[in-house]
Amino acid sequence: MFAGKPHALAFLADGSLVVGSSQGITLHDPAAPSPPRATVEGIGGVEWMVAHPDGESVVAAVREPRGRALVRVWPGSGRVVSLVPAPIAGYQFCGALAPDGARVYWRRSGPPPVLYTVDARTGAVLRELELPQEANRAGALAVRRDGAVYMQGDKMLVVHPDGRVEPRADSPFFIAPEPLFVADDGGLVGTRGERVGFKDGAFVHARELGSARSGTSRTTAAG
């Protein structure tokens, strides 16, 4: 049905399906996915991809002849904008798009590991922030609406908008989850479906938030 091995899927505002595969990016009608409506020319296989909130584009880590690169792609028109040129080193791409779509965050493995913030429209580097060595363990990032970045470390790391790096040792799981989504209240969902809440200044298992929902406890945001 799809060319190559699909690695990531995204939907545009009009319902179109974007497939990021080992052979590139294609645009499909979900009701009749084959053949693709469009194929984006000039980019390599996709490792990572997310939909942009503009409803028309995606941000993707792709393989180019010189190595991994980060691009923003408009599958309907075929427009491609380079955000981070190749080569991006590392075993896998570790990044996230801000909820408002204005910035992309990605972690370069170290020593020392560095968290880059880039403009999602132009690719301009907005900040380079050195991280503790434990940030090399991270395989995924997630961004809270206020700009705080969550990642795995020895347990968990929270990088606050002011640049303060907060190691957390209170993950309710023996192995801290790789964050997929962070809620405004500081809780998160992991890439394997783990659900973590934030109550009374600590990360807790989501099941412990039952009393908070009934109004007997107050849930607040980390930091």
Image (cartoon, rainbow, N blue to C red):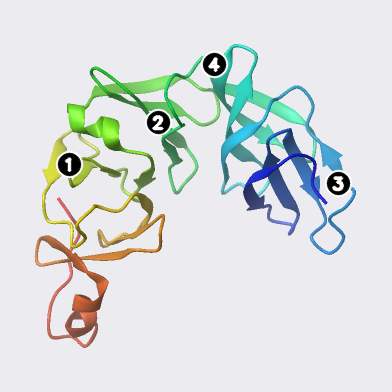
CA distance separating discs 4 and 1: 30 Å
Q: Is residue 108 above or below residue 146?
A: above
In the picture, the disc for residue 36 is 3
In the picture, the disc for residue 106 is 2
Q: Position of residue 167 (x, y in %)?
A: 13, 42
CA distance separating discs 1 and 3: 43 Å
CA distance separating discs 3 and 4: 27 Å
- The residue positioned farthest toward the right in the image shown: 35
Mark 2 or mark 1: whose residue is earlier in sequence: 2
Does residue 84 appear in this view?
Answer: yes
Mark 3 or mark 2: whose residue is earlier in sequence: 3
Does residue 75 appear in this view?
Answer: no
**Left or right position of 187 against 90:** left
The residue wearing badge 4 is 85
* Three-letter code, disc 1: Asp
Q: Is residue 194 above or below residue 145?
A: below
- Figure quadrant of residue 21: top right
CB contact under 8 Å: marks 4 and 2: no
Number of other residues with Cα within 10 Å of mark 2, as a class: few under 14, some 14 to 19, many 20 or more: many
For discs 2 and 1, the disc positioned in front in the rendered view: 1
CA distance separating discs 4 and 2: 13 Å
Mark 4 or mark 1: whose residue is earlier in sequence: 4
Q: Is residue 107 above or below residue 213?
A: above
The residue wearing badge 1 is 154
For discs 4 and 1, the disc positioned in front in the rendered view: 1
CA distance separating discs 3 and 2: 30 Å
